Image: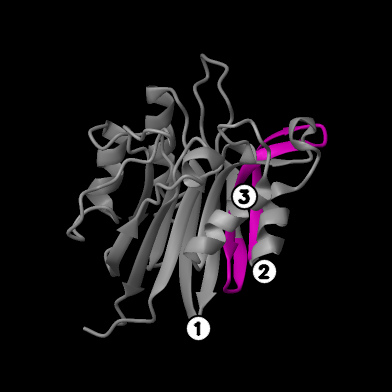
Amino acid sequence: MKLSKSISIMTYNVHSCIGRDGRISPFRIANIIAQYDPDIVALQELDVGRVRTGHIHQAKMIADHLNMDFHFHPSIEIREEQYGNAILSRYPLRMVQAGSLPTLKDRTLETRGALWTSIDVEGQAVHVVNTHLGLNGRERATQAEALLSSEWLEHPSCCSPFFICGDFNALPLSTVYRRFKAKLQDVQHGNGNRPRNTYPSFYPIFRIDHIFTSPEVVVHSVEVPRTSLTRIASDHLPLIARVSIREP
């Protein structure tokens, strides 16, 4: 079996760069990312132009600090204020699709979204979908079905290899997790290590942040850094996978 160059991917819910100490610091988040040096980063809960975080574009500030390319998609827009997800990459990337995920018609719930990019890793297209699913169980199930359908992962343009990652708000025993696991591989399974929890950061007891991949991705190692800095910079811990891709 011939493998491509090794790459690393991180998913991280950054809580609008507001730490557990109340401090707003995109640079603290950027420094955590820099320490682990991933090639691709999926970030959730970013503010853009919001009063509460100083009107800054958090995705751009972090990407500029890391010298990475990025795409941001707002899940929520209120006048000039935006809130959503981003994908950063040290390789060239292009937006394929971004949009809202379904919600429940009988309830007023926070709008959730997904962002899909194609990343050129030394001539090989790698598809990455970043998402943040809802807190309501029925809503999450509906959103999962949408992501696993022809709208997203089964779309003809979503060719292997691909990753879907983010804050799924879904535990490993949940129906939503099992739906993804039935079709894809969880990077925290099968690499010889015990799966690590990601939330809350100060004392993680839940595993709700995930990276799922298509079958030809070979997982070499997984890390959930629990340091004095990661425990305070956000309410989630980052999840990092180092992988290679089987060449045809």
Do callouts 1 and 2 mark residues in contact (Cβ within 8 Å)?
no
User: To which residue does mark 3 refer?
Assistant: 28
Instruction: Name the foreground residue: 55 vs 180.
Output: 55
Q: Is residue 79 left or right of residue 159?
A: right
Q: Is residue 221 on the magenta stretch?
A: no
Q: Quadrant of the N terminus?
A: bottom left
Q: Is residue 92 on the magenta stretch?
A: yes
Instruction: Name the foreground residue: 193 vs 2.
Output: 193
Q: Is residue 55 left or right of residue 143?
A: right
**Quadrant housing residue 71:** bottom right
Residue 247: percent from left, percent from top:
31, 82
Question: With respect to residue 240, does 102 lie above or below?
Answer: above
**Quadrant housing residue 14:** top right
* Disc 3 packing (10 Å; few <14; some 14–19; many ≥20): many
| Type of secondary structure dominating the magenta stretch | strand
Question: With respect to residue 123, does 142 lie above or below?
Answer: above
Q: Nearer the viewer, mark 1 or mark 2?
A: 2
Instruction: Name the foreground residue: 233 vs 99.
Output: 233
Label 2, secondary structure: give it.
Answer: loop
Q: CA distance from mark 1 to mark 2?
A: 20 Å
**Lower position in the chain sequence, tag 1 or tag 2:** 2
| Residue type at numbered disc 2 | Asn
User: To which residue does mark 1 refer?
Assistant: 123
Residue 6: percent from left, percent from top:
38, 76
Magenta region = 69-95
Instruction: Name the foreground residue: 129 vs 20.
Output: 20
Q: CA distance from mark 3 to mark 1?
A: 32 Å
Residue 160: percent from left, percent from top:
38, 68
Question: With respect to residue 248, does 242 lie above or below?
Answer: above
| Residue type at numbered disc 3 | Arg
User: To which residue does mark 2 refer?
Assistant: 67
Q: Nearer the viewer, mark 3 or mark 2?
A: 3
